Amino acid sequence: MSAGLLALVDDLTALAKLVASSVDDAAAQGSKAIGKASGIVIDDAAVTPRYVIGYAADRELPIIAKIAKGSLRNKLVILLPVCLALNNLAPWLLTPLLMIGGLYLAFEGFEKVMDVVRGAKESPAEGHGGAAPAAVSEEQKIAGAVRTDFILSAEIMAITLATVATAPFITQVIVLALVGVGMTVLVYGAVSLIVKADDFGAYLAQTGSGVARGFGRGIVSGMPKLLALLGTVGMLAMLWVGGGIITHGLHELGVHGPEEFVQHIGAMAGAVVPALTGAVTWLVTAAIYAVIGLGLGAIVAPIGHRIVPAH
């Protein structure tokens, strides 16, 4: 009996070490995945506030909470098991599907560029606190936001899966779950702060002391600029991430020329400034990938308009 108990203790200890090792590895892999998906996160944080435009201030956070709940369901209930099944049953599909996601990012980035060119881009801060549009109910807004989130969440989870595709199964599960939860908390936590920041600024401007009032007015006047900056950064990030995914996907499928060309140009540019080689190389390669993403977005735009619902 004692020998059996000792054997059980040894097994539990080995299992605990395995889980601890997997968690450590998952944390490292998860941080890489978050970095690669940063463009999607920034864009999501910049776009989501528009879903509460026109609703009373006391409904803003509940609406965001419902969208966040739908986002978690997208990632953990639907996409996580699909990703695991895909990677373990048909791993050859991962690169093509990831490239399709890259085309979506390129399409979205191209559409945002065209909005800027046409001057039709509406600031997410416009109309904040006004009357809710009669034709669109709160439930319809939330449903539309969750549908849009599904596409972005699918790309996040696909990028994450590509990062841990060869890792042990338990590491894949932990990383996908951690990234799914972490990204949701990060995006919708940031959105909540952004949405309520102008209310906080207005409160300070009305009730605070001289310095506090000035600070409050600064918040109110600065929020549209912050949202515009986030939108621009998200737009550029979607283009370079999309272009990079497609280029790397072609490399994985045996078409090495485009990625080797981009890397060669980046290395040449970095060599010109030895003190900043890494930064210059990254900036140049990211810029080329962004141009590639813009071109691909223009090519797929006619198809994208038919497939992706307006949002």
Image (cartoon, rainbow, N blue to C red):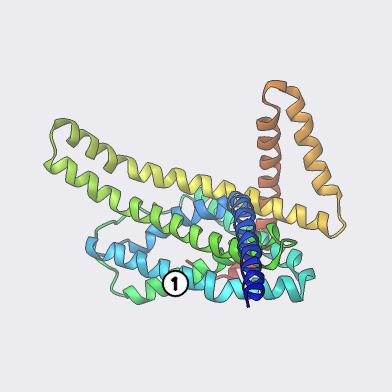
Q: Residue at x 20, y 46 (%)?
A: 202
Does dot 1 land on a helix, a strand or a loop?
helix
Pick whichever, 54 or 29, lies toward us.
Answer: 29
Viewer-proximal residue, 131 or 181? Answer: 181
Position of residue 286 measured from the top left corner of the image (x, y, whole percent)? 67, 42
Q: Residue at x 78, y 40 (%)?
A: 263
Which quarter shows the N terminus? Answer: bottom right
Looking at the image, residue 199 sits to the left or right of residue 49; the answer is left
- Tell me where residue 238 appears, x and y as whole percent: 59, 52
Residue 236 drawn above or below residue 265: below
Q: Is residue 227 above or below residue 88?
A: above
Name the residue at 82% across, 57% down. Answer: 252
Q: Which residue is mark 1?
A: 70
Image-based side of 205 in relation to 76, left or right = left
Residue at the (43%, 45%) spot, across then down = 228
**Between 252 and 164, which is closer to the camera in this rendering?**
164
Q: Amino acid at mark 1?
A: Gly
Relative image position of residue 29 (x, y in whole percent): 64, 53
Work out whether residue 90 or residue 249 is closer to the camera in this orientation and state it. Answer: 90
Q: Position of residue 296 (x, y in %)?
A: 70, 56
